Amino acid sequence: MPAYATAVGKAMLAFSPPATLAEVLAQGLARVGPNTITDEESLRNELKTVAAAGLAYEESESATGSSCVASPVLDSGGSLVASLSVSGSVGHLDIDRAAPAVRTAALFLGRQLPRNSALAQG
């Protein structure tokens, strides 16, 4: 599943080095679900929103009926380590209610990690 079509992927892309996003964009933004973002400007705007809020959302972007909220896990130095999410079906998961818990859990996990534990290391 392409990162740009999932909340987990968008949470990670928003906090990844610019070269990572450039690689994704170079491959093109193919539609995989009915609401997949397929143009560069819209994706860039979405990622700015994700970076500001620390939360990424998906509703029927990766598949019809999918719903997800995700938050990046950043180490104590602010580097991306992972992404944490909750997903379910549209209408069965209230992502607006789940979002604060996902963000809090991601922040807690990140605070447990030492500086420089990012994915890019090693």
Image (cartoon, rainbow, N blue to C red):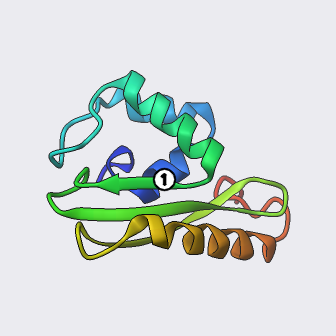
Pointer 1: what residue? 56
Residue type at the position of mark 1 = Ala
| The one of 88 and 24 positioned closer to us in this rendering | 88
Determine the residue located farthest toward the top in the rendered image: 41
Crowding near pointer 1: few (<14 within 10 Å), some, many (20+)? many
Q: Position of residue 68 (x, y in %)?
A: 37, 64
Q: Quadrant of the C terminus?
A: bottom right
**What residue lies at 29% left-to-right and 29% top-to-bottom?**
28
Find numbered disc 1 in the image and state the secondary structure of the residue it sits on: strand
Q: Position of residue 11 (x, y in %)?
A: 52, 52
**What residue lies at 18% left-to-right and 39% top-to-bottom?**
31
Q: Position of residue 102 (x, y in %)?
A: 56, 71
Whether residue 62 sits left or right of residue 11 in the image: it is: left
| The one of 108 and 1 positioned closer to us in this rendering | 108
Q: Position of residue 40 (x, y in %)?
A: 38, 24
Whether residue 63 sits left or right of residue 13 in the image: it is: left
**Quarter of the view holding residue 67:** bottom left
**What residue lies at 47% left-to-right and 71% top-to-bottom?**
97
- Residue 57 against residue 105 in the figure, above or below: above
Whether residue 57 sits left or right of residue 120 in the image: it is: left
